[in-house]
Image: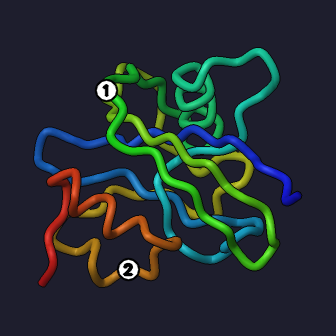
Amino acid sequence: MPRTIRSACAVIQREDGAILMVKRLNPPEAGLWSVPGGKVEPGESLRAAAAREAFEETGLHVDIGQRLWTAQLVLDDGIIHELHDFAATTIGGVLRAGDDAAEVRWIPASQLATLPLVAELFDHLCAAGLASRL
């Protein structure tokens, strides 16, 4: 039976609609752009994990809002990645690329389709009304 890793992610959107994106430094999907997120620690809630991961990867403190989507992905590593993505807003901190982020930047929604994104992220952003196809 394949192993499952639960992850929580923060979809941080600015007032102008730009979304904070992180270029992944480590596998899986190293070198691709994603929203901040990562593994849920034992005993940690999904929302707490999303806020912690956002801070670790971007230096920003965020307020976690509604769940936007839940998805399961099986990548080349053969592990089931159970993703829980939440809307988030910035409430403090200083923007910087953190522990496992090669780069972090605000991307206008109109440019998301041009970025090399992690698997299925663009489809979920479109379904949530945060991006649109060209």
- Foreground of the two, 111 or 11: 11
Q: Is residue 93 left or right of residue 74?
A: left
Query: Which mark, residue 23?
Result: none
Taking the spot 38% from the left edge, 20% from the top edge, the residue there is: 63
Question: Which amino acid, mark 2?
Answer: Leu
**Which of the 4 image quarters holds residue 87?**
top left
Taking the spot 22% from the left edge, 58% from the top edge, the residue there is: 127
Residue 75 % position (x, y): 69, 73
Which of the image's four quarters has the C terminus? bottom left
Taking the spot 30% from the left edge, 52% from the top edge, the residue there is: 19
Residue 58, compared with residue 52, is above or below; it is: below
- Foreground of the two, 134 or 56: 134
Query: Which mark, residue 115?
Result: 2
Which of the image's four quarters has the N terminus? bottom right
CB within 8 Å, label 2 to label 1: no
Q: Is residue 87 left or right of residue 4?
A: left
**Which of the 4 image quarters holds residue 101?**
bottom right
Q: Is residue 111 left or right of residue 69?
A: left
Between marks 2 and 1, how big is the CA–CA gap? 25 Å
Residue 65 % position (x, y): 33, 23
Residue 8, compared with residue 123, is above or below; it is: above
Residue 115, compared with residue 34, is above or below; it is: below
Q: Is residue 39 left or right of residue 110?
A: right
Taking the spot 28% from the left edge, 59% from the top edge, the residue there is: 125
Question: Which amino acid, mark 1?
Answer: Gln
For marks 2 and 1, the one nearer the N-term is: 1
Which residue is labeled 1 in the image?
A: 66
**Which of the 4 image quarters holds residue 100?**
bottom right
Q: Secondary structure at mark 2?
A: loop
Residue 76 % position (x, y): 75, 79
- Foreground of the two, 124 or 54: 124
User: Across the whole image, how many numbered discs are drawn on residues?
Assistant: 2
